[in-house]
Amino acid sequence: MEGSPQPPQPPQQPASKHGQQRHAYNEQQDIASRPCQSCGGQMEFNIEHQSLVCAHCGSDSEIVHAPGAAVVEQSYAMLGSRAASGELNTHLEGEKEIICQNCGGHTTFVGTTTSTRCPYCATPIQRTDIHEAPDRLAVDGVLPFQVTDERARELLQTWVNKRWFAPNEFKKYSSAGSFKSVYAAYFTYDAFATTRYQGRRGDDYTVTVGHGENRRTETRTDWNHVRGVVQDSFDDITVLGNTGFNDKFVGELEPWPTQGVQPFSPDYISGHLCRTYDRDVEDCYRVARQRMDAAIEQTIVRDIGGDHQRIEHRQTDLQGLTYKHVLLPIWLLTVIYQGQPLQVFMNGVTGEVHGERPWSKLKIALAVVAVVLAIVLLITLVSLGRSG
């Protein structure tokens, strides 16, 4: 996920191995981080203070937003014309080389990484051309980290310690694994849905049948045709726009407190890893629409009522479909265990933790033996008690 380092050297424009031109950048607007007014060092977003803090002298500075900046919902209907004209670019190609303003070292950005640290002096560096590129969807907002590094490590250790059947080696490796703060790219969707449906409602009732010893009670269902109209309001359905993450565990970090999303500023991602989207807004919408349809189905079921419900036909009309491209904070632990990478994710605002873990066959076997021995002991004590 990080840019690959190259030894410090004078600015140049070499061609990549794929024959594409690779450009070196050292303009201040490309670095995007603000220098400290007191000592000239680079300012980083400090989670505890929710502001920029100089790593050298500790000076504090407020986050800067553009005049009139606001988090605005974007019309999904407007995407069609932009895509048809070829204005939007889904995939990133080539590489970009950025020169650190602090030490002059070169860092090559590849893939969707847009923010990292200089591998030579740890200075925060960013490539802002992606977030501001006219053929990419701009970032509408960012949800700043709230869980500090120290608190995140405490919560992670608690989670690891509760994995009773995880190998001891995994618990040791977890403290030595790669643990980083990452802003992941998400799309959120809002819509108001009106759905007309037809189906059947089943109401159970009981009857007594048979005679004598064969007399019994049976449950039967009375089915009736129904139709109706239901409405659903969807607010900030979040869909991950990055690949390379375990979608199942990242999905379990929801719900995200999106009411705290702030207008985008590169100040928030200074000193943290950041990625732009791999899956575009239309790909992510397909996932969001599946969630909407599932929620609409539950609304219809409740509206039909009764003991059983069958939906035979439905038609949904979506109004006011909008989206936002936002950056959401994730603490990511990556552990290499027996040659396999395991990922553990933490919601950078709520502290919710979910992830992969290995299983210890030895611990499981010992637990099974212990349970069997306990059962045998219990049976023996019961038998002795009865004979006594």
Image (tube, rainbow, N blue to C red):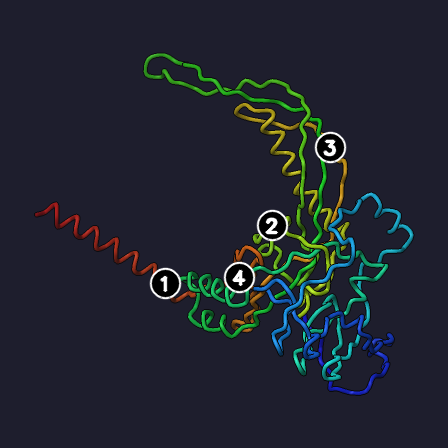
Type of amino acid under label 4: Glu
| Structural distance between the alpha carbons of marks 4 and 3 | 38 Å
Element assignment for label 3: strand
Type of amino acid under label 3: Thr
- The answer to whether residue 64 is above or below residue 120 is above
| Structural distance between the alpha carbons of marks 3 and 1 | 52 Å
How crowded is the residue under tag 3: few (<14 C-alpha within 10 Å), some, or many (20+)? some
**Marks 2, 4: nearer the viewer:** 2
Earlier residue among tags 2 and 3: 2
Residue at the left extreme?
388
**Marks 1, 4: nearer the viewer:** 4
Tag 4 near tag 3, CB within 8 Å: no
Earlier residue among tags 2 and 4: 2
Write down the residue under mark 2.
257
| Structural distance between the alpha carbons of marks 2 and 4 | 24 Å
How crowded is the residue under tag 1: few (<14 C-alpha within 10 Å), some, or many (20+)? few
